Image (cartoon, grey):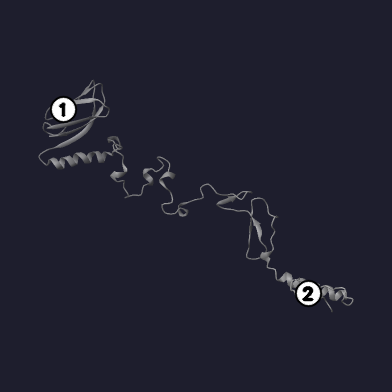
Amino acid sequence: MAVSGKTAAPHLIPYFVGSDAPPDMGDVTEAMAERLHERLDDIAPSQITTAGAGDEAKLLVVQNTGAPAFKALSGDVTVNAAGVAEIGAGKVGATELADLGVSTGKINNKAVTLGKLAEGLGLTEGYFANGAVGAAKLAADAKRLFPQLVAALVGADHKVNFGSATTTTGTKIVAHDLGATPAVVFLTPRDSKTMYVGVRDGTNFTAHMVGGDDTFDWFAIS
């Protein structure tokens, strides 16, 4: 059939103009349908969108087959109608953290307990403030280490012993178990009181406390 030259472009639908011979409607509609089918076949499903048809707070997701579809986020992330995304509580684990990803400022005071310290990675002296660790914070084995160290320093000719006691009415007789009269006795009150050593012999020494009664630590060398 005779049609207008305006159909030369592949995206145009054929049509008749006034100078064409009277059309046959079957030929006209068939030509239009064929051209329309060709154009539709050229359009991939991914080019067809449903913008504006999604529910609130959903994302338009491109799929491998078929048209894109609105999908609600699931799992660890949520999004609101304004497009603000948020990671759910407790969703960030160790595998999501980069090495050294948590700075000191992000750790609450006293949040790291002894159980969280790796075995064998002890704290060195530089990590403790002056006077930060008192006698009460030392384990019993650690307290015994000092007398053993002193005993090693003074040699086999001397004996060393230590302990703690509490005065009554300002006085306490302490059995030192040295087997000889102590040459030196050190007294350390738990509170800020004054103490001194009185009589000492091969069995005992007498500790005196000024200003009331309290527990004290002692250390004796024969």
Q: Quadrant of the C terminus?
A: top left
Direction from residue 149 to residue 107 in the image, left or right? right
- Residue extending furthest toward the bottom: 1
Which residue is found at the position 15% from the left and 40% from the top?
151
The residue sitting at 47% across, 54% down in the picture is 96
Which image quadrant is residue 209 in?
Answer: top left
Q: How many neighbours does mark 1 have within 10 angstroms: few (below 14), some (14-19), or many (20 or more)?
A: many
- Determine whether 169 is above or below 148 in the image: above
Residue 23: horizontal and vertical position, in percent?
88, 75
Q: How far across and how far down the image is residue 146, in percent?
A: 21, 40
Q: Residue furthest front?
A: 19
Q: Quadrant of the N terminus?
A: bottom right
* Closer-to-camera residue (125/171): 125
Which one is in front, 84 or 218? 84
SS label for mark 1: strand
Q: Which residue is mark 1?
A: 205
Amino acid identity at mark 1: Phe
Q: Is residue 108 above or below residue 120?
A: above
Q: Amino acid at mark 2?
A: Thr
Q: Badge 2 local density, few (<14 within 10 Å), some, or many (20+)? A: some
Front one among 196 and 141:
196
Residue 166's x, y, as percent? Answer: 24, 26
Displayed quadrant of residue 41: bottom right
On the image, the x and y values in percent for residue 5 come to 80, 76
Q: Which residue in the protein does label 2 denote? A: 7
> What residue sits 22% from the left and 25% below the top?
194
Q: Could you give the CA–CA distance between mark 2 and mark 1, rounded to whole angstroms?
A: 122 Å
Q: Is residue 16 above or below residue 95?
A: below
Residue at 25% across, 41% down: 142
- Dot 2 falls on a residue whose secondary structure is helix
Among all residues in the image, which is located at the extreme left? 157
